[in-house]
Image (cartoon, helix red, strand yellow):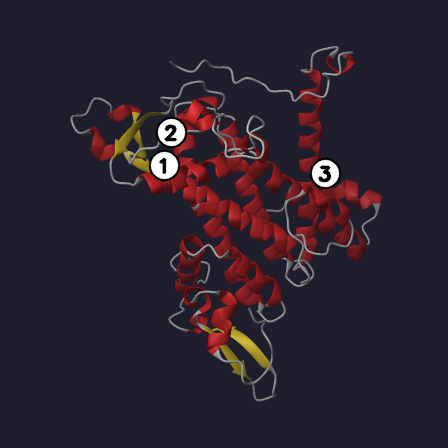
Amino acid sequence: MVGITHRGNLVFSEFVSLTGNVALFGNFRYRRHESGQASLELGIVEIGHRGNWASWDTPVLVELTLFIHFHPGTSCIRHVILSASKTLTVHQWEILVVAIHRACTSTLDPLRQLSLAFKENSDSFYGDLATVKVAARKDATIAQNERLYDLAQQVFLMQSQRQCNKCPGKVCECEVARGVVVDDRSYVFLLYPLDKSDVSTPDLYAVRVPFKNLVIGILAHQMLIQTVSSALLQNLNHITPILNILQISSCSLRGILTKVNAKHVDVMLKCLEVSNVRARAFDARPGLKFLMQKVGNLSKAANLYTQANTSEVVQIIVLIELCLDGIEKYSIEPSSLKDILAREEKKKCLTDSDYVENFLKKLHTKWSRLCESYASLTLVIPDGVGDDSDGDCGAEMYIKPPFQPFR
């Protein structure tokens, strides 16, 4: 893998080897200006580009989003984001972050469709706001399903849940003991509107969500979130030691917080917020989690705790970094800080200082919710849990979902 250099003999094939695929930045052009300075320009911006660039039909967004969806070489995308941060113009950065935001949102569309069929805290696995059924089709192979179930475990279970304590140092045989049989059937969730249940042809109104699309979409989304997180968390100035709790690999390249506008950072923070909201919505529906456990052949209830935790923690870390930098840059005093927090959040930010004010408000909201969550969890802990004398106080606490699975 080669870096983006300013040598005049840099050929297009070298840049293709950098990205790993021609489809991503096939329209990037290496141009040497009359002044002798070299730059990398996104040629597709200049070809057939009319009107508002933010339109979802813009060829730039379509091409870049298609790459992110179907060629998830996120390590290459991360390398391009970090290494080309000084080369890309403000306009090109805007295109890039919006495309990533669109990809992060659309990869969770299957999950959003399923979540909308269930009410929060609902025990029903048949759906509340829509009738949910599962159809099986014999259009897959056993090898494909084995791989899909492995991906489902990676997506829907925490690392501690995937580890088997009964089979240390050998191939886990618990799945065989549970009687799980992998066949050649694929599964599709069928969502029927409640007001169309009496029609003669309900299939015309059904929304089909293949289980394969759901798993692969969430997996691609988590890879994108990992990429966004690693790009935002490189070499922070204030709270680097806290990064040890995250599964973010270190990188020698500098981060992008000091090289992009606050507007672009805000878009990437929205990617993390979308991830957190979708994951929490899924975890708040025990009936849907149980249904996913049965369809995915999971040994435990499906959950997106890791995704929700990662997106929330990364947001807090980045917001702390941005707020500390903003307070130092604009010399915000404690009295001014109270006034900022008392104002309403600005819907449209025009300057970096406006974004700093919104970052301060978001961080204040995050901390308030975190404290409320901690207080509510502390209140429901039974008395004497930490006073056990048998040494069992360190055991993991598990809250059973408030429903009984069918037999």
Residue 180 left/right relative to 163: left
Q: Quadrant of residue 334?
A: top right
Q: Please, what is the three-letter code of the amino acid marked with disc 3? A: Ala
Q: Earlier in the sequence, mark 2 or mark 3?
A: 2
**Residue picked out by circle 3:** 342
Would you place residue 291 above or below residue 23 in this image? above
Q: Position of residue 179 (x, y in %)?
A: 39, 23
- Are the residues flagged by discs 2 and 1 in contact, CB closer than 8 Å? yes
Q: In the image, residue 312 lies at what x, y percent?
A: 62, 39
Q: Nearer the viewer, residue 283 or 195?
A: 283
Q: Considering the numbered disc 1 on the image, is that residue within a helix, a strand or a loop?
A: helix
Proximity of marks 3 and 1: CB atoms separated by less than 8 Å:
no
User: Which amino acid type is shown beneath numbered disc 1?
Assistant: Phe
**Which residue is denoted by mark 2 in the rendering?**
295
Compare residues 385 and 229 and report the one nearer the observer: 385
Residue 75 got which mark?
none
Q: Residues within 10 Å of mark 3 (few under 14, many from 20)?
A: few
Percent from the top left, x then y, of residue 285? 48, 25
Tell me the CA gap for discs 2 and 3: 48 Å
What is the x, y in percent for residue 406? 39, 14
| Callout 3 secondary element | helix
The residue under the point 74% across, 44% down is: 242
Quarter holding the C terminus is top left
In this view, 224 is above or below 179 = below
Q: Which mark is residue 211?
A: 1
Query: Residue visible at 46% across and 42% down?
Result: 218
| Gap between marks 2 and 1 measured at Cα | 8 Å
Mark 3–mark 1 distance (CA, rounded to whole Å): 46 Å
